[in-house]
Image (cartoon, helix red, strand yellow):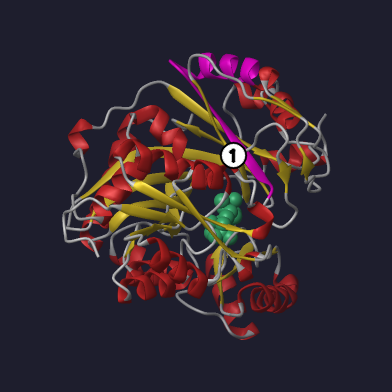
Amino acid sequence: MTPANQPFGKILIANRGEIALRVLRACKELGIATVAVHSTADEDAMHVRLADESVCIGPPPARDSYLNIPQLLAACEITGADAVHPGYGLLSENARFAEILDAHGIAFIGPSAEHIRVMGDKIEAKRTAVRLGIPVVPGSDGDVTNDRAARRIASDIGFPVLIKAASGGGGRGMKVARTADDLSEALATARAEARAAFGDDAVYIEKYLGKPRHIEFQVLGDGKGGGVHLGERDCSLQRRHQKVLEESPSTVIDEETRQRMGGVVAKAVADLGYAGAGTVEFLFEDGEFYFIEMNTRLQVEHPVTEALTDIDLVNEQIRVACGQGLSFGQEDVRFKGHAIECRINAENPQTFAPSPGRIVNYHAPGGLGVRVDSAAYQGYRIPPYYDSLIGKLIVQGRDRQECLMRLNRALDEYVIDGIQTTIPLFGRLIAEPDIVAGNYDIHWLEKFLADPD
Ligand code: ADP
């Protein structure tokens, strides 16, 4: 066990793919030894090659390997790791995992189990937001269990309404009811889907917003009552409620609004005594913010914020977890230029069907303002067992126009042969007048995909 305020000696990275590599890079810069874990399907993965040590923790299915807590604990014991970084997804928002590590004297690089638990229950998270003075989407105060209660709430807030799973994530378990006639069926379907996906059929009701932007704020808490914000990311370009492209600054947020809302979320994080990185997600419509959830982990799109602020978020997470606090204060945060991230998935760019297989040619773009976070390489075989994200292209420029120009040429330069990827989709998107003008909401991409003309 590491004494308080001492840097960690060895960090086990409980993840795979590009995020395992991202964490590994921060550890190397800090001179901290790294342990990679992997399933038998990931023996040739880049994170395994680059880590100081590696441990095989089970067969390909994630539930038997990357989600296998006893195996991860054993890997910590064998290697003498004194901390675990969970990355995103997998066990990153599993309060029980954080508790078990703590009971074994191993630090979890993330917030307290209590904060993970509160924010993991979206009904509880909304109540907490209200208590902290954060505006939320109008809706039910808690779990909605029957048609009568659903009808009462829907008539209070007005149709259309959205039924959402309390344990939801990844955009699953959401159903829209446009009229009173749809309500009973939408409620039953949402509950059944939530039970199947999350083992919990608790659902709640929210006003369904017609044309919002998804605006989220990056926050960091020092765990000692201090909190900062690092501005917003606009993640409105989504397919099936999943983010596809993210940018900052948002074309609809001005400096006054950024500082005002940033101030609200930074204060909330401080009041909570929150430790580490988090993201407070909002829908933004007609000048108003509505809280939807808080993610208590590093996000896929965190490099967008790093590009604008030059702050290494993983480094800050590690500092906070070992009691060193943040390396900067709010007054040190400056935002420069514009950044856009494209999620490169191994998928057919039209049908979005997964496209695992061997990469026969690989060439990543480079040059000024271009960052590629990827664990892919020439000859790498993408296993079919995990999510399809194989890389992220993050481009920055002095302004949005320069950023788009640079993105265009970086996409052109990116070669991934042997499998299909979403690279061509981004080429099409940034040629669209609405995207060039920054004029899109959360429904724009679905409409574009349904009818590109
Ligand atoms: P998840 O945890 O499953 O990702 P979120 O609550 O974060 O669910 O919502 C994901 C996305 O679903 C949002 O970014 C937005 O596009 C859409 N969404 C969520 N709530 C609403 C709402 N009240 N009205 C309209 N769209 C919504």
Nearest the camera: 281 or 154?
Answer: 281
**Relative to 98, does residue 275 appear above or below in the rendering?**
above
Residue at the image position 80 percent from the left and 44 percent from the top: 355
Task: Please tell me how crowded label 1 is: few (under 14), some (14-19), or many (20+) other residues with Cα within 10 Å.
Answer: many
Where does residue 79 sit, x and y in percent of width and height?
A: 40, 61
Residue 201, image x and y in percent? 61, 80
Residue that appears at 65% across and 83% down: 147
- 418 falls in the magenta region: no
Residue 18 vs 56, above or below: the answer is: above
Magenta includes 404?
Answer: yes
Residue at screen point 42% across, 66% down = 78
Q: Residue at (27%, 59%) from the top-left corner?
A: 274
Query: Label 1 is placed on what type of residue?
Result: Ala
| Residue behind mark 1 | 375
- From the top left corner, tell me how far across and down residue 253 is, in percent: 42, 33
**Is residue 209 something one can see in this rendering?**
no
- Measured from the top left, where is residue 68 in percent x and y? 55, 71
Query: Which span of residues is magenta-colored?
Result: 388-410
Looking at the rendering, in which quadrant would you find the N terminus?
bottom left
Image quarter where ligand 1 lies: bottom right
Q: Is 453 situated above or below 45? A: above
> Which residue is nearer to you in this view: 131 or 169?
169
The answer to whether residue 67 shows anywhere in this view is yes
| Secondary structure found at label 1 | loop
